[in-house]
């Protein structure tokens, strides 16, 4: 029997001065330096994202802890975002591909269901009411759950600062889940998406979801990205 899941995305964003906002919009360098002796692959990925503000996607596989379970030395010095991600993923089985400017980190152990969900075809997708980048990801997740038959209904709410950027998406036509996620994080000032299983209000088991974060509004949340459900 299909079930109805209540999707709740809580976004707590601090008010920032205009000069701080400008600094978040324009990182000082497009190159990455990350030299650590006790870091995880996810830490290097996050550093790459926050130092360059390149739009980045992360598709987590069946073994969700891969990017967070090993700790070792990283010697990334003045590398491009793409090269930095390649070095960040050494030994993880993950690969990086450039999808029209979005650097997508893909697990080698995606299940058949995970692959189907990322490739799920939407005839159209649009968001006419202004919402945050995190809100766009939540709406994409809800549409994916409904379109793939995982649930029979969704609901949701969002808390955000009045200063947070709001977005509308005109109908982007036929696209896949991954393609829509790439479009979302390519919106100025760009951001990060992650596909993984999470627990949501009303669900007794983890559900596959797309989470999205903006570089201008969600820096603290990006720093806290984890492999946890």
Image (spheres, grey):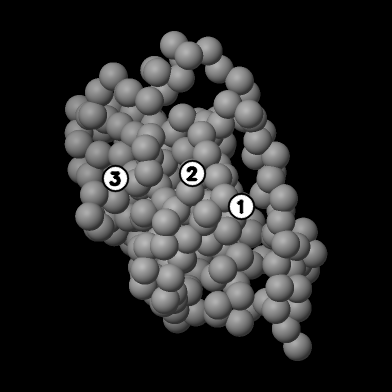
Q: Where on the picture, by quarter, is residue 74?
A: top left
Check disc 3 and report its element: helix, strand or loop.
helix
Determine the CA span between mark 2 and mark 3: 28 Å
User: Where is residue 151 drawn, in percent x and y?
Assistant: 68, 77
User: Where is residue 209 drawn, in percent x and y?
Assistant: 56, 62
> What residue is shown at x 70% (from left), y 78% (from top)?
152
Check disc 1 and report its element: helix, strand or loop.
loop
Please give the residue where the numbered disc 2 appears in the rendered image: 167
> What residue is shown at x 70% (from left), y 67% (from top)?
154
Please give the residue where the numbered disc 1 appears in the rendered image: 228
The one nearer the camera, 167 or 207, is 167
Residue 88 visible in rendering: no
Please give the residue where the numbered disc 3 appears in the rendered image: 85
* First along the sequence among labels 3 and 1: 3
Local crowd size for mark 2, using a 10 Å CA cut-off: few (<14), some (14–19), many (≥20): some
Check disc 2 and report its element: helix, strand or loop.
strand
* First along the sequence among labels 2 and 1: 2
Q: Where on the picture, by quarter, is residue 100?
A: bottom left
Q: Where on the picture, by quarter, is residue 131?
A: top right
Considering the image in quadrants, where does the C terminus appear?
Answer: bottom right
In the shown orientation, is residue 209 left or right of residue 215? right
């Amino acid at each position: 029997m299909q079930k109805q899941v209540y999707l709740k995305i809580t976004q707590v964003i601090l008010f920032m001065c205009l000069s701080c906002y400008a600094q978040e919009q324009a990182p000082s360098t497009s190159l990455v330096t990350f030299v650590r002796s006790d870091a995880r692959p996810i830490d290097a990925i996050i550093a790459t994202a926050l130092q360059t503000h390149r739009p980045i996607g992360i598709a987590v596989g069946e073994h969700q802890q891969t990017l967070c379970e090993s700790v070792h030395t990283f010697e990334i010095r003045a590398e491009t975002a793409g090269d930095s991600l390649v070095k960040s993923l050494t030994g993880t089985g993950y690969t990086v591909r450039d999808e029209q400017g979005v650097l997508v980190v893909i697990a080698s152990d995606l299940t058949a269901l995970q692959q189907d969900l990322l490739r799920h075809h939407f005839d159209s997708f649009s968001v006419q009411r202004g919402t945050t980048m995190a809100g766009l990801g939540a709406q994409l997740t809800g549409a994916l759950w409904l379109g793939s038959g995982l649930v029979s209904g969704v609901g949701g709410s969002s808390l955000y600062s009045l200063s947070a950027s709001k977005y509308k998406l005109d109908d982007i036509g036929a696209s896949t889940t991954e393609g829509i996620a790439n479009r979302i994080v390519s919106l100025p000032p760009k951001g990060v998406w992650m596909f993984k299983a999470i627990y949501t209000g009303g669900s007794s088991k983890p559900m596959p979801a797309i989470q999205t974060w903006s570089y201008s509004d969600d820096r603290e949340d990006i720093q806290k990205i984890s492999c946890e459900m």
